[in-house]
Image (spheres, rainbow, N blue to C red):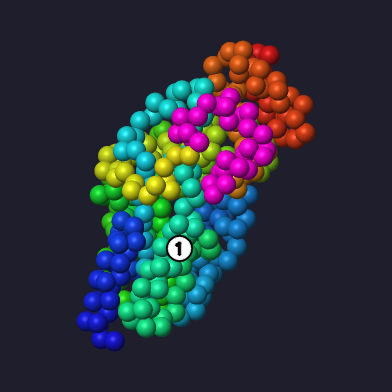
C-alpha cells in the first residue's frame, strides 16, 4: 500500500477504536532505545521489590519486534475508568471506611479491553486483509507507558503515571502490535513543570525523586504485589487504603480534566467505593471469592485481603465494633493474618 493508503487506514483505525469505546487511539514505532537505560537503572536499584517478572524478559520489553516478530508499529489505546470526576481526598480521612483504588472497584478491565482490541484487529483485517498482530493489556513484557508516551497519548509524569492534557490520568492502556507500516504520531512532551504535589503527598515516601518510584515503599505494591507481611513502618501511613492507592492521582492538577467513564463494567460493585472496613473484614473466604469474581481484587487472595483490612482496622478510630471484629480473627489459621490482627489490636491498646 502507498503512504496515502496507510494514512487512510490509520484514520479508519482511529474511528473504529472510538466506536469500540477507546477514548483515544495513537500509533508509534518500536524503537524504545530512549527508555531502556532508565528501566535498567530502576531494576539495578531493586526498586521492583519482589516483582521478579519485571526483571525478566528485559530484551522483549525494550524490543517489541522481538516479543511479536514482524511488529513495525504499536497501536496504543486508552480507556477512561473514573466513575467520578471529583478528586477529593476526604475518603482517606474516613477511618472506618475502606479505600479501594478506583481502578479496582468495578470489573477487571483486562478482559474487556483485550476483547475490544481483538475486535479492532478483526475490523482492520476485514477492511485491509491479513496482517500480523497481537493484542496486549498489561499481560506480557510490554513497556506500555513508554509506548503510550511515544505515541502521544500523554507523558509519563513525575509519579510515573501517564498523564493526558485533556483527560488527566484515570485511564487504562492497551496495545495492538501490528506489522503494518502505519504513519506514527508525535510523542508527548512533559507538562508537569515545577509541580511536585504527587511526590509530596505520598504517605510512604515511595518516590526517590521525580519519575523514580521505589515500589517497595508504594502502598499499591504493598497491598497488591507483596504476598508476605507488610513492614511495620508502612502500616500506620497506609491508613484505610486496603487495595491500591490513588493519592498521587487525586492530587494531580491535571485530573481536573477527568472524564466520567461510560463503561458500566467500571462502576463500583458491592459498594466498594464506600464500604466499611468491618463489613469487608467479615466476608468469609467463599464470600470473598463470590464477590470478587471478575474483579482485580481476587488476584491477591483471601489471606492478603484480610491482612490489608486488619491494618485498616488498626488505623480506624477505636470503638467496640472494631475491636470485636479484630478479636474474631485472633485465632485465624493464617500466621500472617494473626500477626497483622495482633498489630492492629495493639494500636487500640488492647
Q: Is residue 143 visible?
A: no
The image position of residue 7, as x and y in percent, is: 24, 76
Whether residue 45 is situated above or below residue 1 in the rendered picture = above
Image point (74%, 24%), residue name: 330
Q: Spot the residue most to the bottom.
A: 1
The image position of residue 277, as x and y in percent, is: 56, 27
Q: Is residue 324 visible?
A: yes
The image position of residue 259, as x and y in percent, is: 29, 45
Image point (53%, 63%), residue name: 141
Asked if the stretch drawn in magenta spans residue 271, the answer is yes
Callout 1 crowding tier (Cα within 10 Å): few <14, some 14–19, many ≥20: some
Asked if the stretch drawn in magenta spans residue 9, the answer is no
Total marks drawn?
Answer: 1
Going by the image, does 4 lie left or right of 81? left
Image point (45%, 34%), residue name: 273
> Which range of residues does the magenta coloring cover?
270-297
The image position of residue 319, as x and y in percent, is: 58, 13
> Which picture quadrant has residue 174?
bottom left
- Circle 1 residue: 115
As rendered, which of 304 and 129 lies closer to the eye?
129
> Which picture quadrant has residue 260?
top left
Secondary structure at badge 1 equals helix
Image point (53%, 69%), residue name: 60
Amino acid at each position: 500500500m502507498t503512504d496515502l493508503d496507510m494514512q487512510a487506514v490509520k484514520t479508519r483505525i482511529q474511528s473504529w477504536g472510538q466506536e469500540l469505546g477507546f477514548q483515544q487511539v495513537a500509533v508509534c514505532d518500536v524503537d524504545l532505545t530512549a527508555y531502556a537505560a532508565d528501566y535498567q537503572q530502576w531494576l539495578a536499584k531493586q526498586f521492583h521489590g519482589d516483582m521478579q517478572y519485571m526483571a525478566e524478559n528485559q530484551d522483549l520489553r525494550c524490543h517489541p519486534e522481538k516479543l511479536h516478530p514482524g511488529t513495525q508499529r504499536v497501536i496504543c489505546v486508552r480507556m477512561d475508568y473514573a466513575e467520578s470526576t471529583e478528586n477529593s481526598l476526604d475518603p482517606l480521612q474516613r477511618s472506618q471506611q475502606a479505600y479501594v483504588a478506583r481502578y479496582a472497584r468495578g470489573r477487571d478491565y483486562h478482559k474487556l479491553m483485550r476483547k475490544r482490541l481483538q475486535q479492532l484487529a478483526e475490523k482492520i483485517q476485514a477492511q485491509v486483509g491479513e496482517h500480523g498482530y497481537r493484542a496486549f493489556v498489561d499481560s506480557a513484557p510490554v513497556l506500555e507507558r513508554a509506548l503510550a508516551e511515544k505515541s502521544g497519548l500523554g507523558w509519563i509524569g513525575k509519579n510515573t503515571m501517564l498523564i493526558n492534557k485533556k483527560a488527566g490520568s484515570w485511564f487504562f492502556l492497551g496495545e495492538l502490535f501490528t506489522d503494518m507500516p502505519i504513519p506514527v504520531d508525535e510523542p508527548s512532551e512533559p507538562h508537569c513543570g515545577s509541580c511536585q504535589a504527587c511526590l509530596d503527598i505520598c504517605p510512604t515516601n515511595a518516590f526517590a525523586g521525580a519519575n523514580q518510584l521505589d515500589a517497595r515503599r508504594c502502598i499499591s505494591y504493598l497491598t497488591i504485589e507483596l504476598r508476605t507481611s507488610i513492614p511495620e513502618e508502612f502500616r500506620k501511613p497506609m491508613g484505610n487504603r486496603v487495595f491500591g492507592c490513588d493519592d498521587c492521582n487525586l492530587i494531580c492538577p491535571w485530573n481536573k480534566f477527568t472524564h466520567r467513564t461510560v463503561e458500566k463494567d467500571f462502576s463500583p460493585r458491592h459498594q466498594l467505593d464506600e464500604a466499611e472496613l468491618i463489613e469487608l473484614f467479615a466476608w468469609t473466604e467463599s464470600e470473598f471469592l463470590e464477590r470478587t469474581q471478575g474483579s482485580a481484587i481476587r488476584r491477591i487472595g483471601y489471606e492478603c485481603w484480610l491482612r490489608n483490612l486488619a491494618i485498616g482496622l488498626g488505623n480506624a478510630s477505636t470503638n467496640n465494633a472494631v475491636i470485636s471484629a479484630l478479636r474474631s480473627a485472633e485465632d485465624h489459621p493464617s500466621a500472617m493474618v494473626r500477626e497483622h490482627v495482633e498489630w492492629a489490636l495493639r494500636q487500640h491498646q488492647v
